[in-house]
Image: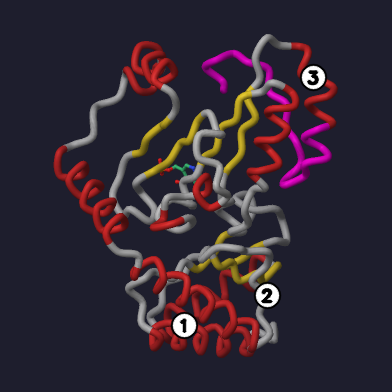
Amino acid sequence: MRLSGAKRVVYKHLNMEDLRKQLTEHRKEGKRALIISDGVFSMDGDITPLPDIVKLGEEFDAMTYVDDAHGEGVLGDHGRGIVDHFHLAGKVDIEMGTFSKAIGAMGGFVAGDSDLMLLMKQRARPFLFSSALDAPEVGAVLKAIQILERDDSLLKKLWHNSSLLKTELSKIGLNTGNSKTPITPVMIGKESDTLEISRIIYEEYQIFASPIVYPTVALGAARIRLMPSALHSEHDILKTVEAFEKAARKIGLI
Ligand SMILES: Cc1ncc(COP(=O)(O)O)c(C=O)c1O
């Protein structure tokens, strides 16, 4: 956005009325417009209302762009991501993703129509002035995608682990916020409590769950973000919940 020199207008989180208001106020100021959103939001695990964004894009003649770093390998059929989850194939102009989350490697991609890709290859400075991915990384990415295409059992296990974790955490009175995905924030609030819980579960249970505090999230909205994987066992999940229960009781949170 910065490199394009375009004017930036920010709309309120998940708020389509506000997006409409901003488009109504500002759309005429430019020849082109691009509505940008994360697909899955990294800190809360909530999901953007992509069908509404696409409709507003059509209504206001604005292109659409989704950063699906946290949706790929998680949402949609065989982990195809948020565009597939909402059955919007071909309706979102640009999809950006990373291989560093569910895919388990490094690197990323931008997908769009062939004219846009040509333009990116010729003009996108961060792409032009970066080294290419190395071969082992590309091999790992291709293999991960093949596994996802072939078999969705890992995906099912991920969602099973995620719902087990959320259900068990809420049974002991902990709040996992508005997450609609396996990203599981344990909302604690105070920064010092969050650091203390993280310390207790590391020292007493050898579970490393790093605290997320201000300025990564708003002051007073500190949390410990958990991300179950398909390779965790039920035992791992229950042990984690037990550790949280013990730590939260110790500091009087529950
Ligand atoms: C929404 C979102 N997009 C992009 C990225 C960047 O991915 P990478 O670290 O693989 O460059 C991240 C986090 O790392 C993210 O949370």
Question: SS at mark 3?
Answer: helix
Left/right of residue 111 with respect to residue 216 in the rendered view: left
Quarter of the rendering containing residue 150: bottom left
Pick the residue in front: 249 or 41. Answer: 41
Q: Quadrant of the C terminus?
A: bottom right
Q: Is residue 197 above or below residue 25?
A: below
Query: Mark 1: which secondary structure?
Result: helix
Which label belongs to residue 175? 2
Q: Counting other residues with Cα less than 10 Å from the Cα at mark 1, is it few (<14), some (14-19), or many (20 or more)?
A: many
Between discs 3 and 1, the one toward the N terminus? 3
Residue at the spot of label 1:
240
Left or right of residue 1, residue 218 in this image: right
Instruction: Estimate the x, y position of residue 188 in percent, counting from the top left.
Output: 66, 71
Mark closer to the chain start, 2 or 1: 2
The residues tagged by marks 2 and 3 sit, at their Cα atoms, a distance apart of 38 Å
Residue type (three-letter) at the residue carrying disc 2 = Asn
In the foreground, 18 or 244: 18
Say which mark, if any, is on residue 26: 3
* Residue 112: mark in rendering: none
The kind of residue on which mark 3 rests is His
In the picture shown, does residue 155 fall above or below 67?
below
What amino acid is at disc 1? Thr
